[in-house]
Image (cartoon, coloured by chain):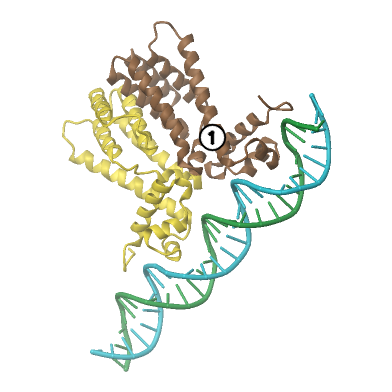
Chain colours: A brown, B yellow, C cyan, D green
DNA sequence: TTGACAAGACCGTCCAGACGGTACAGTAAG
DNA sequence: CTTACTGTACCGTCTGGACGGTCTTGTCAA
């Protein structure tokens, strides 16, 4: 679409995520993001005219990426696999990444709590879809919530569970999901 | 120990939680808390000499309250009930409260991410204890994580699950916990 | 009983710094 | 000529916190 010289947009987005993760959600200032991205503040404001637009882009990119990953996992998955199982596997992989991938969310809701609404409605959508595809509601609830718990641990960079325990959890969930 | 004239300390703490919930984590300023608590800024600073101390008090009170609730639930609980089942019931009750009880956490970690460490170590402690008391590790993992998911939904004020679904989830977990 | 006084609890104002955002002149590439 | 920036200077606002003053309460000697 844009960016002939270089892809500043993505650099900036990545820099914002890094700054949020490393220096904390409250320290996500435009100056910090700009210098981290190797871009001047003027350049940042050229790409994202306001801080809110930056946050919005962060949210939208995140949601789009997850949606695409889910879609391709669904088509590329094992044929006999249930949609719930696919969801569990994909989410577990995401949570297994060493870096908390979305701690910028904290910055976003600190900036304006309304940034949560698109995320919430996306989650709701995914859950409703899963509900239509899963015969056993109890199994769905348990698995979905446990995955949500895993996501939360990743978000808060919690080390309550060991790697082995995480693996055992996932395999148990897959067993429950059938 | 303190507060001869009135109990400003608790009023302030409650006000801080209210402000964080209603106006968002980023808007938790001393001025806002003071006016909400019906106290001047000077008075607030008298009780909590710095913003960090306020946050710390919020964290400590929260942890202490949960610990006490857990302890009394353990002693007052049904005799045949497993510790895991007690934990599930208590946490579910907490999550059932209409107001997100701890959204000030976002404010705290925006202020300084280190406020998470006492919370994390507390969680770890609780989990380790549960691990020593629960024979079935798989059941523990699934239940603990699902509860964590429930907590996260409450924290983010998410409405993905209906009340009925939450109830079904809890009963399923209790079934798994045995 | 009373008056002096100390301490505790709180008020209201002020300030330095940080932040988001604007403005604008310059420049290198296509 | 346009796009995509860089760099600098600047403004208005908000925030944490310091500070000095004020009102209330308890204590205790006379």
Please tell me which residue lies in front, A63 or A28: A63
The answer to whether residue A159 shows anywhere in this view is no
Instruction: Report whether C2 appears left or right of A98.
Output: left
Asked if C24 appears above or below C1 in the picture, the reply is above
Instruction: Report whether B159 appears left or right of B78.
Output: right
Residue under the point 51% across and 19% down: A68
Residue under the point 43% across and 51% down: B56
Task: Locate residue A172, reporting x and y percent.
Answer: 35, 18
Q: Residue furthest left?
A: B79
Q: Residue furthest top?
A: A79
The quadrant in which the C terminus of chain A is found is top left
Asked if A49 appears above or below A94 in the picture, the reply is below
Residue under the point 53% across and 45% down: A26
Q: Chain of mark 1?
A: A
Please tell me which residue lies in front, B72 or B133: B72
Task: Locate residue A25, reporting x and y percent.
Answer: 53, 41
Report which residue position mark 1 lands on: A56
Instruction: Report whether A83 appears left or right of A43.
Output: left
The quadrant in which the N terminus of chain A is found is top right
Q: Decide: few, some or many residues near mark 1? Use Cα within 10 Å; few <14, some 14-19, many ≥20.
A: some
Task: Locate residue B134, reporting x and y percent.
Answer: 28, 27
Task: Locate residue A47, reporting x and y percent.
Answer: 65, 35
């Amino acid at each position: 679409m844009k960016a002939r010289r270089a892809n500043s947009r993505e650099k900036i987005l990545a820099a914002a995520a890094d700054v949020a993760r490393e220096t904390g959600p409250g320290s996500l200032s435009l100056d910090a993001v700009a210098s981290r991205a190797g871009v001047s503040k003027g350049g940042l404001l050229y790409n994202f005219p306001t801080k809110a637009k930056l946050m919005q882009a962060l949210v939208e990119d995140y949601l789009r990426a997850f949606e695409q990953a889910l879609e391709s996992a669904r088509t590329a998955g094992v044929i006999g696999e249930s949609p719930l199982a696919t969801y569990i596997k994909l989410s577990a992989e995401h949570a297994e990444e060493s870096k908390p991938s979305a701690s910028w969310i904290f910055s976003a809701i600190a900036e304006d709590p309304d940034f949560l609404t698109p995320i919430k409605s996306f989650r709701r959508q995914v859950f409703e879809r899963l509900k239509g595809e899963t015969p056993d509601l109890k199994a769905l609830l348990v698995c979905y919530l446990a995955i949500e718990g895993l996501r939360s641990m990743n978000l808060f960079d919690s080390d309550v569970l060991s790697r082995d325990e995480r693996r055992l959890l996932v395999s148990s969930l897959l067993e429950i999901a059938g």
